[in-house]
Amino acid sequence: MTPLAGCLLVSSMLFAIGLAGALTRRNTILVLVGIELMLNAANLNFVAFWRYGPHSGAPTGMIFVLFSIGVAAAEAAVGLALILAVYRHTKTTDLSQLIGRRP
Amino acid sequence: MLDQIFVSLKYWLLGYAPAAIEPAVSILLTILPILLVFPILFALTTVLERKGLGRIQNRYGPNRVGFCGILQPMADGLKSLTKEDIVPAAADRTVHFLAPLVLLAVAFLPYAVLPIGRNMVVTNLDTGVLFFFAIGAISELSVFMAGWSSRNKYSLLGAMRAVAQMISYEVPLLLSSIAVIMAAGSLSTVEIVEKQAGFTGIFPHWYVLTPWGFVGFILFMIAATAETNRSPFDLPEGESEIIAGYYIEYSGFKFALFFLGEYLGMFAISGLGITLFLGGWSAPLPFLTWVPSWIWFFSKLLGLIIGFIWVRGTLPRLRMDQLMNFAWKFMLPMALVVVVSAGAWRFLPQGVTRWLVSIVFLALAYLLLARGVETRNKIAKRTYRFAE
Amino acid sequence: MRLMSAPFLILAAVTLVGACAAMMFRGLVHCALALAIAFAGIGALYLNLGAQFLGLAQLLVYVGAIAVLIVFVILLTRGADSEPLSPAARPVAGIVVATAIFVILAWAIIHSGAIHSSGQPAPQTTIRQLGGALMDGYVLPLEVIGLMLTAALIGAVIVAMKENGR
């Protein structure tokens, strides 16, 4: 069990937890939380390969993760703004009431 | 030499440690001064603040407990340790308990990157300034935890206001430090201080003595006052406003921990301001370099603390919308102009040209922003019917 | 075959417990605080792997901004009431899918060449090199992400603004 394999296992476990949460929870905000966890798991993967994988000293892994953090922040902001707007119209954040709802 | 007395003391003590645990003893010896000095400074500041505010308000401060009230912190400490620790029945006990602990942990961490003297820094991180700001951003969560776990609507309101204020003022804080980072070429606090340690003639190379550094320092200190919820930005915790905001439901020792955390945050951010703009531990004049470096750092820190106390006693509190307008509509554009001006300073040749260009940028931005904002809500001049 | 070091195991445990708690707690604010712990754990893992700038940027952006944003939205949508754990339809399906994906990934990792790779010294990427790379080879993504963040900022403000006259 090398450190690289350990990091990859942790990141896949994190991904699975995020996926389980995003698929099972009923509140929209918690679905977004699950998505953020999945993004973080992928970033951890990148950093693990940058550190332990074959590399030529290029900072490519780090830079990818930097941009990924930026994009995830923007996406969280827009997603949460959407949740707020939907809440203002429908007074609920419960997915089972929002799916198939007639506007 | 007196300058390196603490460093020599540490290595002498380290000589007595057995080789097996030497790294652990070294770490302990490096951290211990911070854990001792800054809480003592906190105790001194509480008494200084109360007496200073009292004198500004034309009254004596506390003067019963020692000679001129100097033992007042002992009395305060004894009081907060022996008060009953009340937790509301509806409060969330775990989060209520954890909030002051998180605040305290997060308040002590930033001291690790402040260079207190020559060769006297806990750790010389490559990304020291970023470490400082990352830890400062975590303290917002602890404020929110304190406010929400009390299940009290005033406490929650105070917490939301405090977090909104802290987030808004983080941006000018970061932008004014980016100007310094650009000029110094490094994120490491030790290198930033070393770049400011030289002299040209009689003037030191401190960044506060450049046009963009001066404006940047003022912006940094205003944002620091807002980040640590000090007057005039203490709407979330003012006693006459929202009955102490997010720490209403804390009594006894936990309240003392919050108080300690807040003052430690104030010292840390003043320390960063000194490191970035005022030259850290370097002396102001070339013939004063015989004074030890750590004495310079603490004198500058004391000067900034007196400045904080002075501003608290003088200016009235800002309202929430005034506060937010100030941050987003004045300080953010001004901080961006400071960054541009710092860039112009760096690339123009030395001489009158770069002073003129920098000053013109900053003056233009200030006139457009400050005068532009002021003329929007003209308040009618008050006329008195019976008093003429 | 080198065993994994104790700091890594402790940090991984904290992160995974935080993530599980974030997905399993009843109260929404508790979920958000557990998520903040998970983010801090991931930041600490980055620092453990030697990516200084990334770990601190993760702490600054995720814990300092995104976790606070999630907490604000929870409070603004009155989510303080606790909700049942799973929808009325099939909760088991989600958990089965996630477990299947984890099993497949773990099998792929364990049977791949990753387990036999040799320990290499950490790449010494300083801040200066990172900044140079951002300004030199990756300047186009940098400008595009600046534009995208501006668009996201303006878009989020417009979407969440209160409409007048309703």
Image: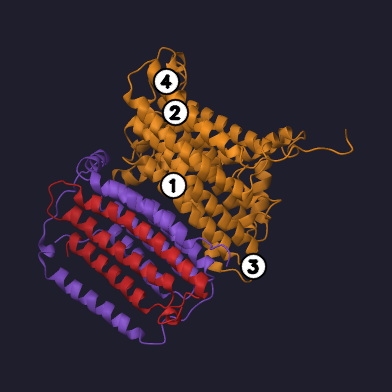
Chain colours: A red, B orange, C purple
Q: Quadrant location of the N terminus of chain A?
A: bottom left
Query: Mark 4 touching mark 2, by CB under 8 A?
Result: no
Callout 1: residue from which chain?
B
In the picture provided, is B338 more to the left or to the right than B381? Answer: left
Whether discs 2 and 1 lie on one chain: the answer is yes
The amino acid type found where label 2 is placed reads Phe
Query: At which x and y percent is residue B244?
Result: 66, 54
Whether discs 3 and 1 lie on one chain: the answer is yes
Q: Earlier in the sequence, mark 3 or mark 1?
A: 3
Mark 4 lies on residue: B355
Mark 3 lies on residue: B88
3D distance between C-alphas at marks 1 and 4:
38 Å
Query: Mark 3 touching mark 4, by CB under 8 A?
Result: no
Query: At which x and y percent is residue B313?
Result: 68, 37
Query: Mark 1 touching mark 4, by CB under 8 A?
Result: no
Checking the image for residue B109, the label placed there is 1
3D distance between C-alphas at marks 2 and 3:
54 Å
Q: Earlier in the sequence, mark 1 or mark 4?
A: 1
Instruction: State which quadrant residue B45 falls in.
Output: top right
* Residue at x 13% of width, y 64% of height: C115
Query: At which x and y percent is residue B358?
Result: 42, 25
Callout 4: residue from which chain?
B
* Residue at x 39% of width, y 23% of height: B197
The correct choice, above or below, for B63 with respect to B238 in the image is above
The correct choice, above or below, for A83 with respect to B112 in the image is below
Instruction: State which quadrant residue C85 falls in.
Output: bottom left
Q: Residue furthest front?
A: C165
Mark 2 lies on residue: B361
